[in-house]
Amino acid sequence: MVCHASGFAEHNAAGAELQRSLVDAAGDVALIGPNCFGVLNYLDGMALWPDQHGGQRVDRGVAIITQSGTIGQNLTMQRRALPIAQLVTLGNGAVTGVPDLVEAMLDDPRITAIGLHLEGVDDVARLSRAGVLAARKGVPIVVLKSGTSEVGARTTLSHTSSLAGSDVLCDALFRRLGMARVQQVGTFVEALKFLHVNGPLRGRRITSASASGGEAALVADLAESHGLDLPEFREGTRRRLRELLGERVSIANPLDYHTYIWGDRAKQAACFAELFSGDFDCHLLLADFPREDRCVDGAWTIAIDAFLAAQISHGGAGCVVSSLPEGLPDSVRERLLAAGVAPMQGTADCLAAIAAAARIGEAQQAAASLVPLRVPSPRRGRERRVDEPSGKRALAEYGLAVPDGRVVTAGEAPEAAVELGFPVVVKAVAANLAHKTEAGAVRLGLTGPEQVRDAVAEMAGLSDRFLVERMVGGAIAELIVGVRRDARFGLALTVGAGGVLVELLRDATTSLLPVSHDQIRDALGRLKIWPLLSGFRGEGADVDSVVSAIAAIADYARENEHLREIDVNPLLALPHGAVAVDVLILETRSSDE
C-alpha cells in the first residue's frame, strides 16, 4: 500500500495522531508513506506514482530508496545511463522503513546494487542487520546522507562528544557495514552505475589512459585524494608500450599515449591490452566525444572500439570516463553499458565512485566477521562524575597502564612526591573538575618538595585531596581515546590526536563498539598523526601497546552499564608501552545507587 497524502506526523500533533491511527489500520500490510511520491518498479512494470517519471523498463539494475519524493523523481530523469530497477520514496516511513526495503530488495537477484538517500538513521540496529545481510550476499550499498550539522555537540562536557557528533556516528555505522558514503547526487549516481557494471573492487590499483597530459595529471591528483593507487608498469609492459608508442612518449601510469596512434585501431587495442594484462583492479580510458550537432566523430569511436577489444580479450573491470558529464553521447553510453564497460560521466565523480567500490570490496572481504549492532536502551538517572584516581583504578583493572601515584592531603604531598621520585605531577582531586588545566588544578614537571608544597598551596581552594603522580616523559605522540553512549547508536569509540591538539587539529576517527584489535589499528592508520606513531623520521611508538590500551578502554566501556562518557586524554604513546595520564568518566546512576 502507498499513502501519498501529507498532513500526518510531519505537520502537527493532530497529524501525528492521524499517523498513529494509519499505522494501526495498516496492521501487517507493507505501507509506504505517508507523505511520499510512492514506488516505481521498472523490473516488473509497476508504478504507484502520482506524477511524471523518466525511467524505463529494465531486466536488471539498481534499487534506490530515498526519503525525498523530489530527489527520487529527479533521479528518474537522470541522463547518466544508470539502469534503475526500483525506486521507493519513503516520506514519513511510518510502517515500512529502510531496513525492511533493503532486506526485501536483497531477495531479488535482478538488483545489482542499492542506493540509500537518507536524512537520518532511525533504527540503527535494524539497519545494521540489513547491512550485514547485504555484505554477506555481496550486494553493494551506496549512501547519500544529508544533515551534517554538529550544533548539538558544541556544549558537551567532554572532548570526545565534540569529536563524535551524530553525523560522525552515521559515518562510523556506514563504514562498519561496508556501505560507501558519498557527498553529492552526481557521485551517488556514478557510484551506483560503476557498481552495477563492475561490482565491488578487490583492491585500489588502477590504470588510466588518455591522449592528454592534462587529463593524466588530473586523474593522478584525484586518485591520490581518494586513496587510489597508480602503480608503475612492469618492465615488460614498459618495453612493449615503448615499442608501440615511440620514444617521444613518456611511459608512466597514468598514461598519456599522445596522438601518434590516434585513429589506428590495431595499435590502440594493443596499447590498451598491455594495460589490461597487468595486475590492476580497474582500467580507465578518458574520452570526451565532440558535439554531435557541430562536429564529426570518427577517431573517438575507434578509441572505444580498441578499448572494448582489449577488455573482451583480457577481462577485468573497465570504464570510459568523460571529463564533463555531457562528454559521452547517449549512443556511446548504451554501447558501453551493453558491453560491460561502465560509461562514467565526470572525472571527479568517476574517481570517487571507484574509491567507493574499493571500500565496499574491502568490507565484503571481511563480511564473515561482521556482526549486527546491539543498541541497549540508555539508563535513566542522575549524572555522576568519577574522580580521576577512581577512574584510573577502574581502568587499570582492565589492563590500562596508568602512572604510579598517591592520593594524599596537602601536608602529605611532598613526602609522597619524594617516595615516587621526581619529576612529578600534582592534581587537585574532585569529581567536579572536568578540565583541570582550565581550572588551574594541575601542575606539571615539579622537581622538588618545595615546588610540590607551593603547588598544593596554590590549589588549596579547589580541593583538600591531591593526586601526586610520577611524571611520564618521552612520548612519541599524545592521543585522545574516548567512548560515549548514544541513545541510537550505542557505544562509540573515538581515537584521535590528543593533548592540546584535540580542538586545534580535530584529527579523530570514530568506530562503533564492539571493535577488534585489527579495527583499532585500522582506525589509528586513518589519523593524520599516524606517521608519528609509525616512525616518521625517527623512532615510532609501540603501536601494539597503544592498540591494547585502546582495547582495554573499550572493554571497560562495554562492561560498565552505567557509563555515559569516558575521556582518556592524553594517552601517551611511548617507544615502549602506552600510559593514560588523565581520565574523565561520567556515569548515569539511579537515586538509590
Image (cartoon, grey):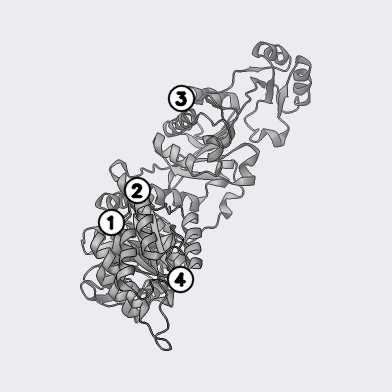
Residue that mark 1 sits on:
139
- In front of the other: label 3 or label 1? 1
Label drawn at residue 523: none
Residue that mark 2 sits on:
363
Residue drawn at point x = 25 percent, y = 73 percent: 42
Q: Counting residues from the N terminus, which is met first, the one under dot 2 or under dot 1?
A: 1
Q: Is residue 393 left or right of residue 358?
A: right
Residue that mark 4 sits on:
323
Residue 83 vs residue 554, the one in the foreground: 83
Identify the secondary structure beneath mark 1.
Answer: loop
Identify the secondary structure beneath mark 3.
Answer: loop
Q: Counting residues from the N terminus, which is met first, the one under dot 3 or under dot 1?
A: 1
Quick one: label 2, few (<14), some, or many (20+) residues within 10 Å? many
Marks 4 & 1, CB-CB < 8 Å contact:
no
Q: Counting residues from the N terminus, which is met first, the one under dot 3 or under dot 2?
A: 2
Residue drawn at point x = 33 percent, y = 72 percent: 304
Residue that mark 3 sits on:
398
Identify the secondary structure beneath mark 4.
Answer: loop
Residue 197 coordinates in the image, percent (x, y): 29, 64
Residue drawn at point x = 46 percent, y = 57 percent: 223
Residue 90 coordinates in the image, percent (x, y): 36, 66
C-alpha span from label 3 to label 4: 54 Å
Quick one: label 3, few (<14), some, or many (20+) residues within 10 Å? some
Which quadrant would residue 268 be assigned to in this image?
bottom left
- In front of the other: label 4 or label 1? 4
